[in-house]
Amino acid sequence: MKIASAVAMAISLMTLAAQADRRGGEERRAKPVACSDLTAYASEGNTTISSATLVTSGSVTVTTPNGATTTYSNLPAFCRVIGVSRPTSDSNINFEAWLPTSVSWNGKFLSNGEGGYVGVIGYAGIALYLQRGYATVSTDTGHVNTDLWWAVGHRERAIDYLYRAKHLTTIATKGLIKTFYGKPASHNYFQSCSNGGRQGWLEIQRYPDDFDGLILGAPWNFQSHSNAGFVWDGQALSAPGAAIPVAKLPNITGAVLAACDADDGLVDGIVTNPLTCNFNPDTLLCAGAETNSCLTAPQLAALKKIYAGPSNPRTGRQIFPGFAVGSERQWTALVVNFRATGLGTGYFGNLTFEDPNWDYSKFNFDGDMAYADFKVGTPGNAIDRDLREARERGVKIIQYHGWEDQTLQPAYSPQWYAQVVRANGGLEKTQDFYRLFMIPGMRHCSGGPGAWVVGQGTGQQPLVRDDLHDIQTAIESWVEHGKAPSKFIATKFTTDDVTATTVQFTRSLCAHPKIARYKGGDPNSASSFVCVNGDDDDGEDDDD
């Protein structure tokens, strides 16, 4: 084991040295240009710049497609570059690159990602990254979010959204950086969640040269099958008498906690590892009159389907995992959505069948699923498990996912990770470049009753910026210094409000497949927890 680790470290250092040599050559460079001169820049995909303005006021007001305005303050002086890529006659990919002036630039590029079906530039993300000294970018991916049916009759716009927009804006921004500063970024990073996580995985699989390190939260990378889950849930809940009232959700979670909360050694209202939770939903069946503490037979059947996830009616094979036990208290939007509106309709009604009158109740999980996989999944799913090219280039990946995710089914992350491990030589070899961290008690991307703040996203930020508390610092330490993260210390503030500063408790987040187990001491301190194998009960610290 020690010899293998030494070899892995040697290879990592050799990769770092090669990258440094390459960048050293690149940095024998042209002179920097003025911000306003960037309007002459052009790049791949018929990309042009419509304006480049130096902003020195410390704030900027932006307008989104629906007319809403937001002002971002406490910004360093920066060059605001507005551009567009038109790789086809039906393409119109808007993007903004925000480049801090040289005095405040940290020398790195950190790309924002875009969630959902986007259609709007992610200003909150690029404002935060700019404040931290990064050159950054975001794109609307080629359409506006005021048009719900933007893909109907527009195949090229669908391709732009699915993968082309992110790559083209990345190429453009790297070129703008080199032109504006007279040298390329020392390192190129990506951080995002949800659809942004899918974008990141597509970059790794299609364009492994684009980024050196990526942070991918709750990735929607098997997008076609995840969306099938929303349709499955809608069909289950719309069956006669199957609707689960919102008032029953806390009691369902309460029953799960009674069965599994103590599995990690501490009763704290959170299920640490739903995969090993031995919960029998049949215990919820009403024995007499229906109350909020029990489920009728049709409601129980719907609950079991939500847990199980969709399956192929012909083969019986699971299409995608369901939602996790212990996350039911987060399902308010799920149980009132009987018609698979939102993400389900956006994928199948808009992108797949291109039919605003698409009917979720008629979706067939065999033939229709195969059609969706072919038409939209082929360009848009990011499920190529062979990551040799990225690994050999030295790319590093940190993925995270909250176990109480109410939007994207969290059990897929460890399932996907296991597939990658099998395809890339086992756990040890995979952890040389890719590590997964599951976050107990976290909702979709952020928030929830667990300790979840580790520097991800645009919400609450850690009080300490080091590689143990801040995921962005950690990926940079891994890429630039060869120090891989084995755990994080996550923070739970007294509220999930972005202004909260009072710490309620901290927890260790362990690299999967390890989990945090309570060993005794202050239950509110991460130091009272150790990382052990998921099925290990000896309480001994197994940290790397």
Image: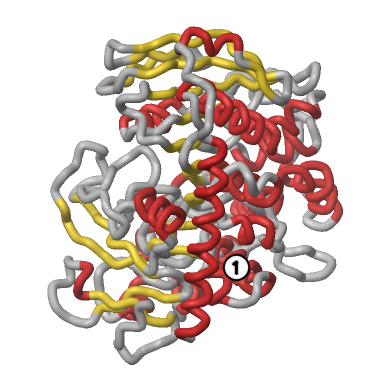
- The x, y position of residue 347, in whole percent, is 69, 39
Q: Is residue 72 above or below residue 257?
A: above
Three-letter code, disc 1: Gln
Q: Secondary structure at mark 1?
A: helix
* Closest to the observer, 44 or 260: 44
- Residue drawn at x 49%, y 45% as measured from the top left: 193
Tell whether 450 sits left or right of 343.
left
- Which residue position is annotated with label 1? 415
- Residue drawn at x 39%, y 74% as measured from the top left: 515
Q: Is residue 375 above or below residue 389?
A: above
- Residue drawn at x 76%, y 47% as measured from the top left: 377
- Residue drawn at x 60%, y 68% as measured from the top left: 415
- The x, y position of residue 374, in whole percent, is 83, 48
- The x, y position of residue 275, in whole percent, is 49, 74
* Closest to the observer, 10 or 333: 10
Tell whether 212 sits left or right of 291.
right
Q: Quadrant of residue 385?
A: bottom right
Tell whether 141 sits left or right of 185.
right
* Closest to the observer, 21 or 215: 21
Q: Is any atom of residue 221 visible in this view?
A: yes
The quadrant of the image that shows the C terminus is bottom left
Which residue is at the far bottom? 538
Q: Is any atom of residue 231 visible in this view?
A: no
- The x, y position of residue 248, in whole percent, is 40, 57
Q: Is residue 59 above or below residue 219?
A: above
